[in-house]
Image (cartoon, grey):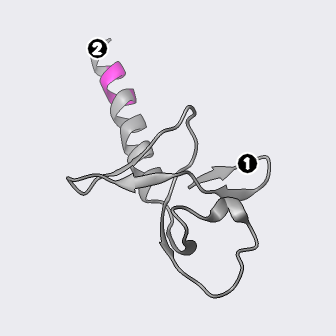
C-alpha cells in the first residue's frame, strides 16, 4: 500500500510473494509505502481498491517500507558527500 497524499488514505497495490519469500509489486512512482496483511472478512469492504487477491485488509505494518526508503536516501546522501 502507498499513502495517497491527494486522497489522504492508503491505496492498495496488487502484489504477491515470490518463491523466495519476497513481496513483489510494480510501481511507477516514489511514495510512502507500507506492507499490509490481508485476511478474509464477512463484512463488505468500504473501499474495493483495498482488496488484493480476493481478501480484505486486516493489519498494516506501517513504516516498514518507509524505513527502507529513508535508509536508502541517507545512504545515497552519504555516498554523494563522500565523492566530493
Task: Give the vertical position of 21 relative to 47 (above or below).
Answer: above
Q: Which residue in the structure is indicated by mark 1?
A: 5
Residue with the most extreme left position: 20
As for residue 69 lying within the magenta part, the answer is: no
Horizontal side of residue 25 vs 81, given as left or right: right
Density class for disc 1 (Cα within 10 Å; few <14, some 14-19, many ≥20) is: few
Tell me the magenta residue range.
77-81
Q: Residue at x 42, y 35 (%)?
A: 73
Density class for disc 2 (Cα within 10 Å; few <14, some 14-19, many ≥20) is: few
Residue with the most extreme bottom position: 42
Residue 12: where, in percent of width, then height?
60, 56
* Disc number placed over residue 63 in the picture, else none: none
* Disc number placed over residue 83 in the picture, else none: 2
**67 or 20: nearer the viewer:** 20
Q: Residue at x 79, y 46 (%)?
A: 6
Q: Residue at x 28, y 20 (%)?
A: 82
User: From mark 2 to mark 1, how far is it between C-alphas?
Assistant: 34 Å
Q: Main secondary structure of the magenta part?
A: helix
Q: Residue at x 57, y 33 (%)?
A: 29
Task: Give the vertical position of 47 relative to 69 (above or below).
Answer: below
- Is the C terminus in the top left, top right, bottom left or bottom right quadrant? top left
Horizontal side of residue 34 vs 74, given as left or right: right
Which image quadrant is residue 46 in?
Answer: bottom right
**2 or 20: nearer the viewer:** 20
SS category of the residue bearing label 1: loop
**70 or 17: nearer the viewer:** 17
Residue 14: where, in percent of width, then height?
52, 52
Amino acid at each position: 500500500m502507498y499513502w495517497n497524499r491527494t486522497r489522504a488514505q492508503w491505496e492498495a497495490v496488487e502484489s504477491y510473494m515470490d518463491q523466495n519469500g519476497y513481496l513483489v509489486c510494480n510501481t511507477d512512482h516514489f511514495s510512502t509505502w507500507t506492507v499490509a496483511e490481508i485476511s478474509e472478512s464477512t463484512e463488505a469492504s468500504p473501499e474495493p481498491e483495498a482488496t488484493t487477491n480476493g481478501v480484505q485488509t486486516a493489519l498494516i505494518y506501517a513504516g516498514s517500507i518507509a524505513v527502507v526508503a529513508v535508509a536508502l536516501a541517507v545512504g545515497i546522501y552519504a555516498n554523494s558527500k563522500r565523492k566530493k
